[in-house]
Image: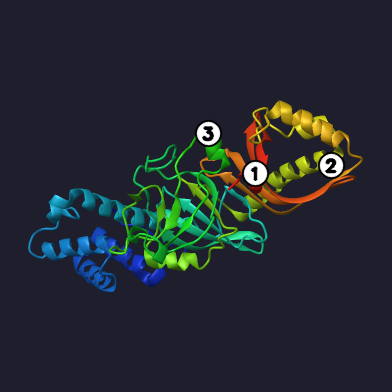
Amino acid sequence: MASLNTSAAPDYGVSEGNEELLIQGLQSLSTRDFDSALEQFRELTEIRPDFRLAQLVYADLLAAQVNPLGQVGSNLAKRQKEIEGLIAEARARLQMESKKPQAGLIPSSLIKMSEDQRYLLAVDTGLSRLFVIENHNGTPRVVKDYYASYGRGGVVKEKRGDLKTPLGVYFVTKRLLDKDLPQRYGSGALPINYPNVWDKRHGRTGSGIWVHGSPVNTYSRPPLASEGCVSLTNPDFLELDKLVDIKNTPVLIGEHFNWIPVAQWQQQQKEMTAVLEAWRSDWESRLHDQYIAHYSTSFSDGSKGFSAFSKHKQRVNGAKSYIDVKLNKVSLFRYPNDPNLMVASFEQHYKSDNYHSDSIKRQYWVKEGGRWKIAYEGEPSQGIP
């Protein structure tokens, strides 16, 4: 292993100090300071006897006192598959020390959190990491991060049973307690809304994608180990679970996040908020051509395509003497692996001379020819998870 320079990496707070001690031990190995590594891994195995990666390395270090130290796990060749997974976990944890985003940076896919969204979860499968992002007076900031395992089939879930983790914008839907779950889910689970309406539109199948703990007989798992879920250590999951609002916590899952400074993020938010505002304003104008120009010709609300929707809106809006639309609690997120796809959610308060309604709306916007257009919109009661 090459030595790592981690002096610039911010400390978001590592639960229980276990990962910090692991990193110290792996770095001692990288500099061939075997005495320090032996002591660090001995301490770690005493703290967490169920931490298989620590037990594996410690066993090799003990064996190395008699025989020369080879590759990690070399004295356990019969368990090669498990060893390879544990070594992959070690690499993932070390990689994070060199690639952790600098303090103050924000994922570019996070455009705007609504004022009632306190936390957002950003899962970067490329780093095997879950970041907890707090809405701090309107400006997001990373407050915690956890090592995370994901689907052993990789990413980009398409069908049931492919063992892959989906990439996209999702929301926590409920909370499942450990007492109601099989032991393999550990200390609890937070299901997310895969497949969402966009997944269904593209024929993606499967279900039961959760953020959950680890099997009760182990501390952590290799990076690719679940059936498509995001898996944390049980202590980390319990800490995370205390922060999650099951009614309003977004979950962004991407393979590699792009992190940007606050000034760039503010400019991006201004531009994307203006896109939504132009749609709202043109709806109020009752000028059909301006209003319908915000919709993609591939638009579908699940029952009407673009042509039928356009005719319906032209008839309804044209019969009004005025239209007043207000949007509250707006959130905007781009798909981490598809920056030309954006999800907008908000409370919509609509009023006209003969009708008024209050609803929650979710829209999927696509970028076509350099312009953002709506490809789907609807209410939760119309089937949006």
Q: What's the residue type where badge 3 is placed?
A: His
Q: Position of residue 332 (x, y in %)?
A: 64, 49
Q: CA distance from mark 2 to mark 3?
A: 32 Å
Left/right placement of residue 72 relative to residue 257 reads: left
Of 117 and 18, which appears nearest the observer? 117
Of the image marks 2 and 3, the number of the one nearer the N terminus: 3
Q: Position of residue 111 (x, y in %)?
A: 63, 50
Instruction: Say which residue appears at 47% left-offset and 65% top-offset.
Output: 240
Which marked residue is nearer to the observer: mark 2 or mark 3? 3
Q: CA distance from mark 1 to mark 3?
A: 18 Å
Q: What's the residue type where badge 1 is placed?
A: Gln
Q: Residue furthest left?
A: 66
Pointer 3: what residue? 202
Label 3, secondary structure: give it: loop
Which marked residue is nearer to the observer: mark 2 or mark 1? 1
Disc 2 packing (10 Å; few <14; some 14–19; many ≥20): some
Label 1, secondary structure: give it: helix
User: Is residue 326 something one can see in this rendering?
Assistant: no
Left/right placement of residue 295 relative to residue 287 reads: left
Q: CA distance from mark 2 to mark 1?
A: 23 Å
Pointer 2: what residue? 284
Of the image marks 2 and 1, the number of the one nearer the N terminus: 2
Q: Position of residue 175 (x, y in %)?
A: 50, 61
User: Is residue 236 something one can see in this rendering?
Assistant: yes
184 is higher (above) or lower (below) than 282: below
Pointer 1: what residue? 382
In this picture the colour scheme is: rainbow
Of 192 and 116, which appears nearest the observer? 192
